[in-house]
Image: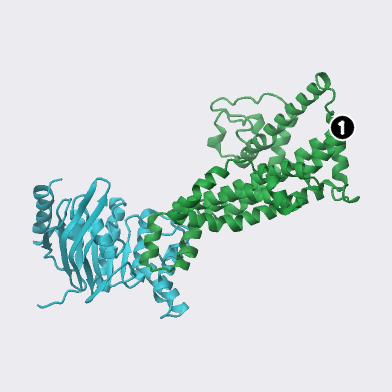
Chain colours: A cyan, B green
Amino acid sequence: MDVKPYRSVCDIDMVFDTRSGRFQALKGVSLDVARGDYISIIGHSGCGKSTLLNIVAGLTDATSGGILLDGREVKGPGPDRAVVFQNHSLLPWLTAYQNVRLAVDKVFGASRSATERDEWTRHNLALVNMDHALMKRPGEISGGMKQRVGIARALAMEPKVLLLDEPFGALDALTRAQLQDTVMDIHARLGNTVIMITHDVDEAVLLSDRIVMMTNGPAATIGQIHKVEIPRPRRRVNIGDHPGYGPARAAVMQFLYDRQAA
Amino acid sequence: MATRAFEIVNASEDEDRVVPMPKAGDPRPAAGRAVNSDIPPEEMDLPRGWPDTAPQWLQDGLEKTVQVVALPAITFLVVLLAWHMVQSTVAPDFPTIGAAWDKAVEVFSEPFADYGPNDKGIGWQVLYSLGRVGAGFGLAVLVGLPAGFLIGASKTFERAWMPLIQILRPVSPLAWLPIGLLLFKAVDPSAIFVIFITSIWPIILNTAMGVRSIPADYTNVARVLNLNRFELVTRIFVPSTLPYILTGMQLSLSVAWMVIVAAEMLTGGIGIGFYIWDEWNNLSVPSIIVAILVIGLVGIALEAVMTMVRRRFDYRVN
């Protein structure tokens, strides 16, 4: 099968000039992602996975190397690479609806009528089951609900790639499971291309098509990529029974705790 | 509800005596609670007298009344008593409470009297002072907000301006009065100038701090959304900084109200500050006491208005 990579991360180097000299965070990171792929990037804290995501998002410039999206090099941030931030990053003076609507207005202000944008905002909030709290401000809803709104905002931009930066890291286990299911469901329905940073092995196995394992910094790079051979749709309750589950989990565990023990 | 409250109050007033504690198993309700026949039986068994058995809202109301009205009233009485004692013993020159009261009645009977430029009612004096504070404060907002935004957003501006601001900020605004008189050759603009100087520092510094405290998350969101410069300012910077701006405005407004009194003492003309100075020259101390109270009350009113504005616009308060 000859699939042209939808997005390529080419030979990324990231060097920070710090007070104590130059610090090479990333070295020669290259990754091809196909359309509709769900990729997880996993690694120990400080391995530069968030830096990598910020580079892909365009929020940080790589020292060298570049990002190709749909055959074109991308520079700087943009709504084609919507980010769901770890701490939701909703604007606290706007309601859930207004937070999403701001993104919708910005991306579709020219191409869609106000009515269409209103419907699209509501539609995306309904996707993450937040249609009951449209007029609530972030301060009035729980952490899980805030993250749902953050996901709705990212989805509403119709990004070519959805970037998730440890999106469930700050949530309790039950809420995290619910949100993982929501994201899995949305990925199945819409076929988004997703790159997710995580440090949770089970989360990576449950959600990903491929798990990208990062070596420890400094000069972190991709140590190993494991393809998760579990057909979709997956269900968290019985995913452990599938023959692809054990090897995937073992591969990541071995990498993280034997080869890259922090 | 209203009737019940009435009955309970009556019960306590009429029957000025110790409420008997009901013994366990005693079917008779305690005398003080006889009126509360609708209290559930499990509560009736509790050995408590009035007011514990009074409805919760009445208890809360009473407690609030005690805290909000009774305690301050006691303080006022103590101060008045001290005034009276000091006046009647060591400071016979000081006006008596009665004299001050008579003056207050006189002053407030026609607050907007106008007997020529040198004899206006206290209402006019306050309004003139408020006008100067409003003008100086308004100008300070107009200049201070953009300045604060620039200093907060740009390291270059911060480096360029902060040393000067740090030097000027601790200076009493009154020191600027001669400069104002020299520049404007008139009393009114000079007083407004002093208020402007008073108000501008807290506004600049708080706005700058607000801009500096904008979380990187918000600017990252703005960057992902590709907000342009104008949208960045109106959609992210201003709403995020607004609570800080309003805090700065509240600070400067209350200081401005203090400074105007002193400034007007020096400039003369009309205004509550000059009123005090004028009454001192007339040796009418009761008028000064009345003016002090008026200044305090107006200050409270200004504070209340700013608090209302903050409540309305501060997303953290809501």
Kindly identify the residue that appears in the image at 42 percent across and 72 percent down. Answer: A106
Give the residue furthest to the front. Answer: B182
What kind of residue is marked 1? Answer: Ala
User: Where the N terminus of chain A falls, by quadrant?
Assistant: bottom left
Kindly identify the residue that appears in the image at 70 percent across and 52 percent down. Answer: B183
Q: Give the secondary structure at mark 1.
A: helix
Q: Quadrant of residue B105?
A: top right
Kindly identify the residue that appears in the image at 50 percent across and 48 percent down. Answer: B162
Q: Nearer the viewer, residue B195 or B22?
A: B195
Q: Report the residue marked by disc 1.
A: B99
Whether residue B59 is visible to the viewer of this picture, yes or no, is yes
Q: Residue A194: image x %, image y %?
A: 24, 67
Q: Quadrant of residue A206?
A: bottom left
Q: Residue A135: image x %, image y %?
A: 48, 63
- A176 on left or right of A132: left
- B9 on left or right of A144: right
Whether residue B35 is visible to the viewer of this picture, yes or no, is no
Q: Residue B197: image x %, image y %?
A: 63, 49
Give the residue furthest to the top. Answer: B89
Q: Residue B47: image x %, image y %?
A: 56, 28
Q: How many residues crowd mark 1 within 10 Å: few (<14), some (14–19), many (20+)?
A: some
- B30 on left or right of B45: right
Badge 1: chain ID: B
User: Where the C terminus of chain A falls, by quadrant?
Assistant: top left
Q: Nearer the viewer, residue A40 or B272?
A: B272
Query: How many marks on residues?
Result: 1
Q: Nearer the viewer, residue A142 or A53?
A: A53
- A214 on left or right of B6: left
Measured along the vertical axis of the image, is residue B309 above or below residue A159? Answer: above
